Image (cartoon, rainbow, N blue to C red):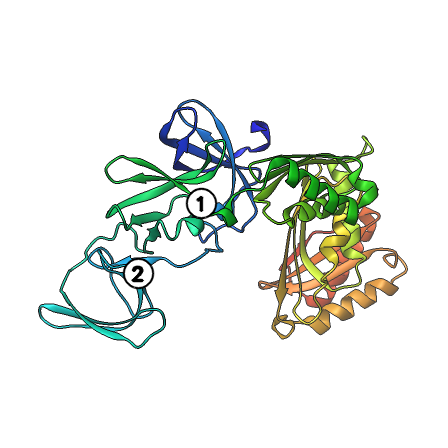
Amino acid sequence: MKEQFKYRLLSQKMFCRYCRSVTEHGIYAKERYSTYGGMAPRIPLLCICGVCDTLLVAFSQEFYFCRQIKGEYAKVYGYNRIMPGNWVYFKGDSKPGVVKSCFQTSNKEILEVSYDGGSPQRLECPKVNVTVEEAPQGYRLLPAQSPCTLIGDHVFHVLRNMFGVSVGLVNDGVKDKLAVLLEDGTILFITLPALYQNESNEKLVEQVRGKLNQVLPEDAKKVTVEVGQGIVYLSGLSKNLLTRRTLRACAEGVMKVRGCVDSLKVVTDGITSDQDLAERLYGVIENSGYYLFDMSVKVENLKADIRLHCLDNNIPKDLEKRLAQVPSLQDMNFTMIPVVTDSLENSWQCKEMEQDLATNSITKNAFVRITYLRGKYLIEGRVHSLLQKQVVLFSVLKTVKTTAIENRLRVLT
């Protein structure tokens, strides 16, 4: 499995079940991602202990850097800066409240706080100047918030009156638990409520297998399903990338599945090269019937990185699915950027040049897209000879009377 997760994202303190202690873990992904601004959920991550190399699979939605955060963080009075709208917790209280307003005097801070949606209560507190916040976002209050606590979250244990940090999700052979490193060095294991316990491996295998057989009965015969601690591992063959993605989505959609590690392989003919595949993908894009431009298709080891622009009033919603059905394509990163139609300059001139080339006896069997972008004319598409490429270029030069031209025409042989 280690060879599938090539890209190191960051280092994170986590509990290692073999070291029986909290150690630095390297967090790896199958693709290049940035945690800046948050990661999308459902991305499998491999966590490797820096001491003993023990492997642990987790998912992006289980870490603090995921975009989709579950639950609320509470600011602890005296340790965070407080603003209206924040949840605030005072040490010794039984619950937090929502700050409705706050203002200061020379020696006091006066807050109006609502508890359980009731009328605001006026609280006069000693003024505290917080210059450095350990957790600017706030804290998870334990044990009440253990089900929504993410790995790396700062926490405050209400019963023990201690701060700490969440360091992982573990299983003791019977129950799933949240591992927390407290400020005094104690490692605490909090049993998660029954609703948040993982389903048994046997039951989850049965449910996932049933879902796959229901949605894609023929393709499911070629897939092996394994489960461990709520994680589904798929291996086997799929006829194309769209089928592979559908199988993975089916597995992820089953209740109590934490995520899916997809090791499925798309069947190939054994002779398709990266260049052949790139040309097939360009063909799907150019024959889609939509106005697409500023296109980039890069293929390496039959994995494609596709980036293109479209008009905001004519977005091809099915294009990614059509590309995913191209034979031999193993994986794909697809980015489509809508552009405001009225923002394109010289659009009529570009269309007239395209029409002239489409009726030209030399270039009529070529596909040419001309767009004016970033102060220059961009020529894209496919031609069948160097002569056609030169004719297209000279035709554009003759019309626009400028050398600010980027020629990306591909010559098909």
The amino acid marked with disc number 1 is Leu
Q: Which residue is mark 1?
A: 192
Ranked by sequence position, the earlier of labels 2 and 1 is: 2
- Residue situated furthest right in the rendering: 361
Residue 348's label in the rendered image is none
Q: Secondary structure at mark 1?
A: loop
Residue 280 coordinates in the image, percent (x, y):
79, 46
Residue 108 visible? The answer is: yes
Q: Nearer the viewer, residue 177 or 263?
A: 177
Q: Is residue 410 visible?
A: no
Q: How many marks?
A: 2
Toward which corner of the image does residue 72 lie, by quadrant?
bottom left
Above or below 2: residue 128: below
Q: Residues within 10 Å of mark 2 (few under 14, many from 20)?
A: some
In the foreground, 65 or 235: 235
Mark 2: amino acid: Lys
Front residue (pair 97, 350): 97
- Which residue is depicted at the point 74% across and 41% down? 329
Residue drawn 27% across the image and 46% down it: 163
Residue 18 place in picture, x, y as percent: 43, 24
Quarter of the rendering containing residue 368: bottom right
In the image, is 254 to the left or to the right of 223? left
Q: Is residue 130 above or below residue 248?
A: below
Query: The C terminus appears in which quarter of the rendering?
Result: top right
On the image, numbered disc 2 is attached to which residue?
A: 95
